[in-house]
Structure formats: C-alpha cells, structure tokens
Amino acid sequence: MSKDIILKADHISKNFGLTQALKDVSIQIGRGEIVGLIGENGSGKSTFSSIISGLYDASGGTMTRNKKPYKPANAMDAQEHGISMIAQEMGTLPGIGVADNIFLGKEDQFTKHGIVNRKQMYREAEKAMEKTGITGINPADPIGKYSFEERKLVEVVRALYSNPDIFIVDETTTALSQNGRTIIYRIMNEIKEQNKTVLFISHDLKELMDVCSRLIILRDGVLISELEKDEFEEEKIKELMVGRKLTGDYYRSDYDAGCSGEVVLKAENLHIKGALSGVSLTLHKGEILGIGGLTGCGMRELGRALFGIEKPIYGTVTLGNGAIVKNPGYAIKHKIGYVSKNRDQEALILTAGIMDNIALPSLPKIKKGGLIFKGVEKKLTNLQVENLNIKCREISQDVRDLSGGNKQKVVFGKWLANESEIFILDCPTRGIDIGVKAFMYQLMYRLKKEHKSIIMISEELPELIGMSDRIMILRKGKLKKTFERSRDLNESAIIKEMV
Amino acid sequence: METKAKDLLQKLVPFLGLFLMIIVFQVMGEGKLLTKGNLTSILNQTVYVGIMAFGAVFVYAHGGMDLSYGGVIGFSVLISILAANTGAPLPVVFLVNILAALVWFLLNGVVSVYLKVSPFITSLCIMYMCRGILNTVCAAQKYSIPVYMYEYDNWTFKIIMLLVVYITYYLLFEKSSIGKANRAIGGNLPAAQQAGINANRTRMTAYILSGITVGIAGFILMLRAGSVSTSTGQGLEMNVITALVLGGVPLSGGSKVKMTGALVGSFSVILLRNGLIILGVNERVIEGIQGLVLLLLVFLTYEKNKDGILK
C-alpha cells in the first residue's frame, strides 16, 4: 500500500435494528491502488462501501479523508468529496436518453434561461465517453435501445464524469459478460495509473485476485484480514472468508459423463427472432447439460424457449414422449422447473412470504377438492426450508428480507417442492457467495444421482467445466461446438469457440 | 417475536379503526349511533357495498383498478326492473341482475386484459356509458318493481346473501388457486407467469367474479330501493374503493390483500358516512370528507409499498 492515505476509516460500526452489520472496522486506503473487498453475503462489504459513498450513516466510528474529517450527508455530498460508486441494484433511468442519464441532476451546466442546450450536452457526453474509452453508444439515443451491459457502461461514464479519486465498483461485474468485464478492468487500471483509487467489491474471487493490488476480507461484519498481492492464494482466501476449512470438492469430482440414453427434452431447429437461428439439443435423463457463450449468444433465449416462455418462430420443443411444450404452465405440469437469471424480477414475488413463493407452482398438485389447505402448504414449505437449509425467521417472512443466497434457495425450493424432473437453470449461482454456491453444486450433483436432468446456462466457465456432462457453446445464435466432460477440458479451449 | 407482534398489529389496525369510529360517533352523536333504527340503516347499506367489495378484491389483488361499480349496478337495477315488469318470476329477475352486470364486466375484462387498455380508463368509460343509459331511459319515466317483491327486502334474506357470498368468495380467494394466482400477478407478473399461471385467464376470471357480485348487489339494491332513477348507484364506486382501503387492502395488489379487509372495510365506510350524518354534517360535505380520508389513507400506506399504491 502506498504511504499516501486517501481515506481512513476508524472503528466503523453499523447497526440495522438488532443486526450488527459492521463491528469496529478500521481500514486505510491509499492512493493508486485497487482494493478488493471480499466476504460472503452479509459480511458487511456492501454496508461498508455504502457508508463511504454516503448512502448510510455509520452508527459509530469516524472517517478521515485527505486528513480532514469526512462524514458525507448523502451520495451527492460524497460525490462532491470525490467519491462515486456504481452498484448492482442501481441502474439507468428508462425512457430518457443516454446523455440525460449521464448528466442526471447535473443538467444545470447546459441550461440557459431554463432551456437545456442538447447539442452541447451530447458533445459533452461524447467527450466523457471518449475519455473512458467507450465506443458504439450514441448519447442522443434513448437508453432503452441498449443492452443491459451497455447501460452499465453508461453508468460507469456517469460515475466517472465528476472525476472522482475514489471509485467504488460494487458487485457490478457479476452481471456482465467477459467483454464488459474487460472494459471495466481496463477503466479500473487507468484510474489506478492516474494515482487514484478503486474499491472493488465482488463475489468472484478469481477476478479480484487478478485485478486487485490488495484484498480486505470481511466476515460477519468484522475485518478478518488484509492481504497484499504476493500473499494471494485462493484456498487461503476462501478459508478466511468462510472461517473454516472448506471440506470436500467445490465441483463434482467424477469424470463419468455417462447417463441413460433416455431423452427427456428435445429442441429441434429453434429459431427466435434476433437470438437463435436453428439450434437443436437433446437432454437425457440424469444428465447435466451446460450451455455457454458470450452475452447475446442466444443462450438465455434458448432457456426461455425450452420452458415455453419464448415462442420460437420456427422449430419445436418437445418432451421425451413427443408432446410439444407450449407454455410455462404446460412445462410445469410435466415437471419442468426454470430458474431465471433475473431472480428478483422474474423468479420471486419479493413482497410475498416464503411459503407463498415456494407453494405457487405446486398449487394444482396440492389442491384437494378445489381447496388449498394451509397445513399442506406449510408442510410442503417446511420440507424445503429444512432440505435447503433456508435461513429465515418464519416461513411467512417476506422473501425480500432474505439474503441473495437464501432467495436463490427459495427459487430452487419452488421446483423441488413440485418434484421437478427437469431443471432449466439460467446462471443459477449468480451473485451468491461461496458457501451457498458450493451447496448449489452439491444439490445439482445430488439431483443428477437421483436421475433428474439439468440444463445449466452459465457465463462462468469454471462451473460449466466443473459440473457439466456435456457443454454446448453457442455463438451468435448458433451451436458452435459441443464438449464432452473430460479431465483435460480447459477454459482456453472453450473461449476460443465463444469469441 | 417482535416482528410477529408488529404483523399482528398491522392486521388489527382495520378492526381498531372500526372500533374507534364506533366509540367516537356513539359518544359525540349522543348515543344515536347504536340505536336499532340506525343499525338497520347501516346494515342495509353495508350489504350491497360489502358484496361488491368481495368481488372487487379479486380485481384489486392482481393490480387492477375499477371505477365502474356505481354505473354498472345502476344499469343492472334498471334492466332487472324492466324484466320484473314483464312478469318474470323472482329467480329470473335475480339472474337478469347478474347477467346485466356481467355483460359490462366481460367487456371491462376483455378491453383491459386482452386489448391492454388501462383498467382505470376502461372502467371509467364503462361507468359513463352506464350513466348515459340510465340518464336516457329514466329521464322521462320512473320505473318501479312490482309490489309483491317488496316483501323480499327482509333481514333474513339479506344476511344470508351477505354470508353466502362472503364465505364463497373467501374460500375462492384465500383457499383456492384463483385467489392465490391473482395475488401472485399483483405481486410480480413475470414471476407468476413463470410459476405456470395463465395471467390473462386469471385476470379475466377476476372480472367475471366481480361482475357476479355487482349483479347480486344490484338485486338487493333493487329490492331495497324499489325503483330506478338517474342517480341509482351513483358514487358507489367510491364507497367500494374506500371500503377496501379502510379494510387495509393495498390498492397495488399482491399478497397482502385479504378478504377479511373487504368485510371490515365495508362496515367502516358505511359507518363513517352514517356517523357524520348523525353529527349533522351535510351529505355533500361528507363526500368531500370521504375523498380526503381516502387520499390520506392511501398516502399513509404509500411508504409500505415501494412500488407505489397505484400502478
């Protein structure tokens, strides 16, 4: 760490009601470094960055910024102090232009006599994007024209416009493809070169180890350890995060790709406008079929089509017996479950209880004489809460109060409760911590052993290689190549087919 | 334990509100509230507002909005009185009530659900269409029910109707998949669809269930009023919405919508209006107060629903 301290936090603590999210955390951040903040869900890393960036008040402790006391009143105040942040949950405002998003709340500089000079605003936006090295986005366009990833980059431009000397990146890369990540890494390195500082929060240990010059590990709101680059060691960091030795294998350890020849789901020559052009696949009983590719390769739409959400313009999705999967209702009736990548938007009713969420797909099954009895619903839910070890106060608790990992367990619980035979999982471990991730992999392996079939769509190559019997790589809406499970399969061989 | 107590308190608020109103109006109204005559009057109005609210719960649960109740019930009363005057027997008149209301709710549902017009606009237009028909038909002539029908405006019948409809709709809403599906749609439409719910069919069913209750309420109103005029049913949509809000039903829909809320709220809204009359407040001023109370309650519950109370 450089000697030039840019931000100093002393004995910071934060309480949310009875929960203590941070306990006496003291951290020093220097100029010209990329500091990684890592820890499991609920370790307090996001709380800490939110306090720095003015979103929360600390319950105790003090901060010093360039040797002066620092206590931001809100995010705007923090920005004026040269600290800005991009976070996973934030986003761009839909319905307005790219430039309007970049200069949100800063329109005054372009305003004369109450009229915004749009030309000047576009020029300035163009300049700002050039400075960050982002191309292919027209500031005059409506934001809705761009993909999720491009919108994230617009957010980065917005955050960097105020020229911060501390840039906080909170869980942003999780949702991005390799391409988008590369751009963000480049920007982070440039900031470092300019002798400014990046605070990088991520679940992805590998990227943190690659990008950061120093790692700070939090567990249960307590600062556990600080490691310099030469001390980075994956196993050691994981142990420090979890607080115990991780036993057993992370992924499955066998290389037996054998499964029964029985076909349970089949897609033939699927065409989806703008996404897929002629993709076929067969899923066998007891098989884990991985599907990978870059963002926009069509794998998400493929998953949605297999579940009957997306209607192909040509081609069919059929069950083992030849019946056509028409819609999600039909798919569920025939024991297919789908885990969406957009958990909070599509897979859960956040304002409803755990029980209402878990029981929803199973209602037709547990109906007795047209009526659904609470006792049956409770039994169904309790079984999954126990089975999946969902941490909650009670099963009527709103799902929105749960942590990311427990939310994802609720989504899995929905399909396990309905005794699904086929699981279509779109990025099933996105945004969840190592502990729950390992649990999910074990669960998938257990399901395979119980002769259930799984399609796992993922942007993370290690998990595709680690879990799949076969991996299909899509590129620009077409099947590029299929890999069989093997000890020798490595990431670079697959990446070659993806790009 | 702490959160449990809070949950319980939230559930009790509508009951506490009702209880508080009873005490305040009883004391300030010098005991005129809880007299036999006045209670009869309260119950009389609660029956048809309540029955409509039971159906409305389904539409509001999926995030819908309906302003057509007053107009449609007026239309239902008009058509059934015309039918009764042709000599049709009472059960047939009852069915005519339901069918007349159902026609409008089918239209309401088709336009809102399948043609994707905002339910707010659709129902507002339907209310106006019904009002237009009433104004035209009833302008020159007043229509009344045959004399023999007056004897059916009795307590046993009305209480039984209220209970039968409540229990049926309670079971449909709380204990069967149609209620749960409507709430799921109100909570998160894509998630509901991905859990296998046919959203269009579910929402359409809500409109049909709501139409049936408006027809039943129309039958009771017809027997009670005995005649139809241009003002029949006027303002009832406001009473139904106020009933839901007073009963703690979030207008944004979702899993917090409860059928008991419609029952408690119906008593509350009628009691509120009745209590103000006892205190000598002018009928026209009461409408203003009701509007203010509704706005205030919606505002107070706004914070709890991040998505906003209305979509």
Image (cartoon, coloured by chain):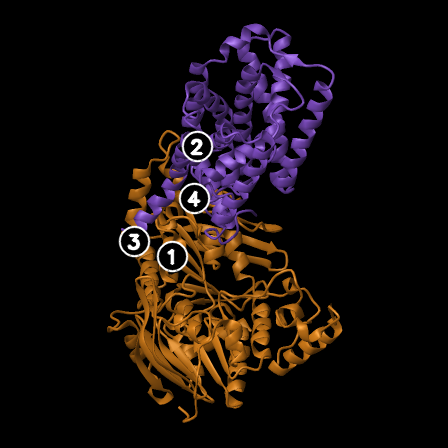
Say what secondary structure mark 3 lies in: loop
Q: Nearer the viewer, mark 2 or mark 4?
A: 2
Say what secondary structure mark 1 lies in: helix
Say what secondary structure mark 2 lies in: helix
Q: Which chain is home to disc 3?
A: A
Residue at the spot of label 4? B256
Residue at the spot of label 3? A393
Q: How far is mark 2 from mark 1, CA to CA?
A: 44 Å
The hue used for chain A is orange
Q: How far is mark 1 from mark 4, CA to CA?
A: 15 Å
Q: Amino acid at mark 2?
A: Met
> Are labels 2 and 3 assigned to the same chain?
no
Q: Which mark is residue B28?
A: 2
Q: Is A492 left, or right, of B143 in this rendering?
A: left
Q: How far is mark 2 from mark 3, CA to CA?
A: 45 Å
The answer to which of A16 and A191 lies nearer the viewer is A16
The answer to which of B230 and A436 lies nearer the viewer is B230
> Are labels 1 and 3 assigned to the same chain?
yes
Q: Quadrant of the N terminus of chain A?
A: bottom left
Q: How far is mark 4 from mark 3, CA to CA?
A: 18 Å
Q: Is residue A73 above or below residue B20?
A: below
Are the residues at dot 1 and dot 4 in contact (C-beta closer than 8 Å)?
Answer: no
Q: Which mark is residue A401?
A: 1
